[in-house]
Image: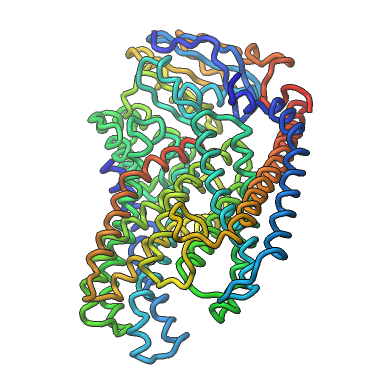
Amino acid sequence: MLINIENLDCRRGNKLIIANVSLCLKTGECLILKGPNGSGKTTLLRHIAGLNSKNINDLVNADIAYSGHLDGVKSTLTVYENLQFWAGIYKSKNLESVIKTLNLENLYTRMAGELSAGQKRRLGLARMLITNAKIWLMDEPTVSLDQATTRLVSDAISNHCQKGGAAIISTHVDLDLPESSVLDITQFKPHKDTKTDPFLEGTF
Amino acid sequence: MSLWEYANPAKFMALSARILPILAIASSCLLLIGLFWGFFLTPADYKQGSTVKIIFLHVPSALMAINAWLMMLIASLIWLVRRHHVSALAAKAAAPIGVTMTLIAIATGAIWGKPMWGTYWAWDPRLTSFMILLVFYFGYLALWEAIEDKDTAADLTSILCIVGSVFALLSRYAVNFWSQGLHQGASLSLDKEQHVDNAFYFPLLICIAGMVLLFITLVLIRTRTEIRSRRLLALRLRNN
Amino acid sequence: MWSIILRDIKLAIRSGGGFSLTLAFFLIVIMIVPFGVGANLDLLSRIAPGLLWIGALLSCLLSLDRIFQLDWEDGTLEALATSPIPLSGIAIAKATAHWITTGLPITLASLPLGYLLNLNYEAYFWLFTTLAIGTPTLSFIGTFGAAITVGIRRGGLLLSLLVLPLYIPTLMLGAQCVSKGTNNPLELLALISAISLMCIALLPFACAIALRANLK
C-alpha cells in the first residue's frame, strides 16, 4: 500500500473544506479525483503532498512528485538547464533518457519562455519523470491543452503506473486511463453542522 | 482545570467579561492615587527641581513599552507551539498599545530632557533603543495588515516577533558601542544603592502597578474586539 | 543545494540584474552623497565608513524581493517544497546565492569607492574585513524577510520596513569598527562575526517556518 489515508480532515485557512477522507493507493493504480470547482481537489492533493501539514508523512509510504497549476518552468533558462536543475535537486541520472522519452531533443537549447503551452507541459512532465518518485500527484495536468498533448500526458501517466508507480490526478477531462478508479470528492463535503471553526463555538 | 481552557474563544470571552470591570476600576484607582501622590505629595529633587515628577509617567510607560513586546513574544510562542487562536489575537491586540507606551515614554523623556540635558532629543543609547523598538512595532503591525489570511498572518507575525526580539536585544547592546550615554541609571533595581529615594519609590511602584493593570485591561478589550471580528468573518464564510 | 545556488546565480546574470545592477546602485548611492553634503575631503573622510556601510546595506536591499518571489510566482517553490531538500536547506542555498551576487561584489567594490570618499588609509583593511564578514548577515536576514513577505503582492516596501530594523546591530558595529581604525576594533569584529554566525545558524529555520506558513 503506497498511500493509506483514513478519516483525514483538510482545512484551508480555518475553513474545513473536506472531512473524513479515506483513500488508499496501491502500486500500479491511478486514482482520479472528480468534483466541481471549489470542492477541495486541490486542497486534498496539497495535503497529500505535505504542503499543508507535516504529519501527513506517516500515511504516505513512498516518494512523491507534485505538480500544481503552475509548471515551475524558468523562462530565462533553456529547456536543458531547467531539467538539469531538477536533476540536480533529485540527484537523478536519467536526464538523457527522459529527454528522449518525451521528444524534447529538438527543444534542447530553446529558452523555456519561448515554448508553447503544450511544450511547457511536456517540460513539466519531464520534471515528474526526473524525480524518480513512485507517486505522482497532479492537479489539472491537462488544463488548456489540445487533444494530442492531452494524449501525451495520459500516456505518460499510464506508462508510469505500468512501471510500478501510482498517481492521483484531479481533472475535469476524461483521461481514458486503464487501471484507473474514480473518486467523487463531493461525498466528503463536511456536514453543515460540523464544528468547522473555533470562533463559531459558543455564544458571545 | 487547566489554564489552556481559556484559549477557547467562547470561554475566554466569558471570563474576560467578568474580570474586565474589576481590572478597569483597579487600574484607574491605582493610577489616580499613584499620580496624585507623585505629583503633589512628594518633595522636589535637590538637583532636578519639580521636573523630576515626570518620572511617574515616564518610568511606567517605558517599562510597559518593553513588557508589551515581551508579552507579544510569549503569546507568539504559544501560538506557534500550541496553536491557540486567542493567543495570536492577544499578541496582535497588544502591539498598538505597545506603540502608544513607547511614544509616551519617548515624549515624556523628551519633555524631561529639555530642562535637564538642554535638548529634546539626543542619540543616547536608551533613547535610540526606544526609537528602534518603535520601528520593530511598526514592522510587526504592517505585516499583520498586509496578509489576508488570518492564520498565515498569525504564523508570520509570530516568527517575526521572535526573530525581532533577538535583534532588538542585540541592538540594545550594540548601541552601547556606538554612543556614550546621557541617561541616568536604573530607577529601580535589586541593588539598593541605585534606588531612587523612598519618597519617590512608593508612589512610583503604585504608578507602575496601575500601568500594568491598565495594559492588561486594554489588551483584554482589544483581544475581545479581535475575537469578535474573527467570529464575524467565520460567520460570513459559513453563510456563503 | 548546489544546483539551487548555481541556478540562482545563472538567473541573476540572465535577468540583467545580478552583479551589475547592485554595483551600479552602490556607486550611485556613494556618488550622490558628495552632491548632498559638499566635496569637503575632511568631512567625507570622516563620514566615509558609515556611508559605505549604509550604501552596502541599501544595495543589498535592492534585490531581496527576487529571492523567493519569482520561484513563488511560477510554482518552482511549491515543487521545491515537495522535494527531498528541507526548506531550511533551500533558504541557506538562496541566501548563499544572494550573497555571491550582491554581498561579494559589494565587498570588493567598497575598496575603490572608499578611495572616492577619501577613506583613511588604515581603515581599508577593516572596511574589507567587516563587509566580508557582515554582508552574509545581510543576505541571511534579507532571505528571512523575503520568506515572510513572499505571499504578499507588492511586498517590496514592506520587506524593507521589516528588514532594515534587523540590519541595525550589524550596521552599528560594522561602521563603528571601520571608523575606529587602529583603536582596538577587534572586539567589534568579534561581535560582528558572532552575529553573522548566529544568523547563518538559526535564521534558515525561521525561514523554513515562514515559507511553510506561506505555502499553506
**Which residue extends farthest bottom?**
C40
The quadrant in which residue A27 appears is top left
Residue A13 placement, left or right of C96: right
Depicted C214 relative to depicted B62: above or below: above
Task: Say which residue appears at 39% left-offset and 36% top-offset.
Answer: C80
Query: In this view of the protein, which residue sits in the foreground, B89 or A47?
Result: B89
Query: In this view of the protein, which residue sits in the foreground, A113 or C52?
Result: C52
Task: Say which residue appears at 67% left-offset and 16% top-offset.
Answer: A190
Task: Say which residue appears at 39% left-offset and 26% top-offset.
Answer: A65
Residue B99 placement, left or right of C213: right
Quadrant where the C terminus of chain B lies? Answer: top right
Query: In this view of the protein, which residue sits in the foreground, C144 or B94?
Result: B94
Please provide percent x and percent y for residue A94.
25, 29
Label tally: 0
The quadrant in which residue C103 appears is bottom left
Depicted B101 relative to depicted C126: above or below: above
Q: Can residue A97 be seen in this snapshot?
A: yes
Depicted B192 relative to depicted C125: above or below: above
Task: Say which residue appears at 60% left-offset and 79% top-offset.
Answer: B115
Quadrant where the N terminus of chain B lies? Answer: top right
Q: Can residue C156 be seen in this snapshot?
A: no
Please provide percent x and percent y for residue B6.
64, 27
Please provide percent x and percent y for residue C79.
42, 34
Query: In this view of the protein, which residue sits in the foreground, C77 or A57?
Result: A57
Depicted B200 relative to depicted B3: above or below: below
Please provide percent x and percent y for residue B153.
58, 41
Coloration of the structure image: rainbow
